[in-house]
Amino acid sequence: MIVPGSSSQSLAAALADETGRPLATATYDRFPDGERLAAVPEFTGEEAVVVATTDSDEAWVELLQLQDAVREAGAEHVTTVVPYMGYARQDESFGDGQPVSARAMAKAVSTGSDRVVLVNPHESAVADFYTVPATTVDAAGVLADPLPALDDPLFLAPDEGAIGIADTVREAYSAGETDYFEKHRDRETGEIEIVPSDAPVADRDVVVVDDIVATGSTMSEAIGVLTDRGVKRVFAACVHPMLAANATTKLRAAGVDRIVGTDTIERGCSVVSAAPAIADALDG
Ligand code: R5P
């Protein structure tokens, strides 16, 4: 059975449809002291696929509880799909006494799972932190689907690290070029400085592609540069539309025409699904 975390209910349903597995109805409650209680009262079968995005601390707790609940209910094999892995950007210690948070989270998940599937983690190397087999899935190609007919398109990565997924989206769109900006982030202040490439953008349609839009600083800085340089239309495409706090406003103010994302984090702009890519990893 597919077992959804509370923040991944649409994706889990899509995955159930995609793979032909039944969808379990999980419940999400709280104890009187505020502690969470995620459960699967009607779970049956030997195989569980827990699908739970980890975009908050509470979601991590829920994920661990669901893994444990399906074991209690008789599951003999548990696969954990982490559509968005929170804490993955802390994949090294940033200073004396600081944790490698991605490793800590991966170890905790591994205690209750037989196999893990990660969708576009920040760095694929975080898969190595799991102590059970962990595979990564690239769902970026589906971001080409909702794009309109583009005029002389440029697929732009806002930093070097995103060139791969910008290329994936360009290939899926079957037209255009790929380029990238250089980004510097001040670790103390979080401020972003973008160094533009010399790619001509005036009167062209540009799709800025990144793995995640979190605070929106990276994407809005890139969009601002493009707007200043006379871009025709600019689209923001990301696998994980975290869109924390005022990120959407920042992108709009910078001049974005449309934001598109997948359902690894379920938001209003999640117009395409990572389910087919995850299904391939599960059964392919
Ligand atoms: C960084 O390397 C990532 O690919 C994203 O560019 C970054 O995490 C986005 O964060 P924010 O939206 O806070 O700028």
Image (cartoon, grey):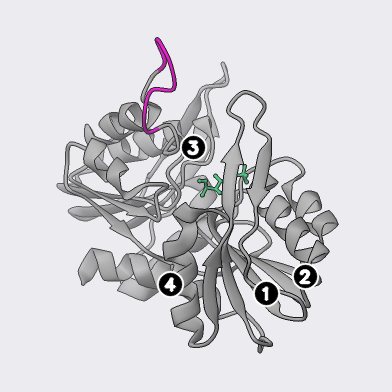
What secondary structure is found at the residue carrying circle 3? helix
Disc 3 to disc 4, how far (Cα)? 29 Å
Which element is circle 2 on? loop
Report the magenta residues as a range.
91-98
Of marks 1 and 2, the one in the foreground = 1
- Mark 4 vs 1, N-terminal side: 4
- Outermost residue toward the front? 198
> Of 127 and 38, which appears nearest the observer?
127
Q: Secondary structure at mark 4?
A: helix
Instruction: Give the mark, 3 or 1, whose residue is nearer the N terminus.
Output: 3
Residue found at x 48% / y 43%: 27
Whether the residues at callouts 2 and 4 have beta carbons within 8 Å, the answer is no
- In this image, 232 relative to 197: left or right? right
Position of 123 with respect to 252 (left or right) is left
Marks 1 and 2 sit apart, C-alpha to C-alpha, by 19 Å
Query: Can you identify the residue that label 3 sits on?
Result: 59
Mark 3 and mark 1: span between their CA atoms? 43 Å
Q: Residue at x 66, y 40 (%)?
A: 192
Quadrant in the picture for the N terminus: bottom left
Q: Which badge, 2 or 4, is on the more N-terminal residue?
A: 4
Which residue is under mark 4?
168
Residue placed under numbered mark 1 in the picture = 200
Does mark 3 have its CB less than 8 Å from ligand 1? Answer: no
Ligand 1 within 8 Å of the CB at mark 1: no
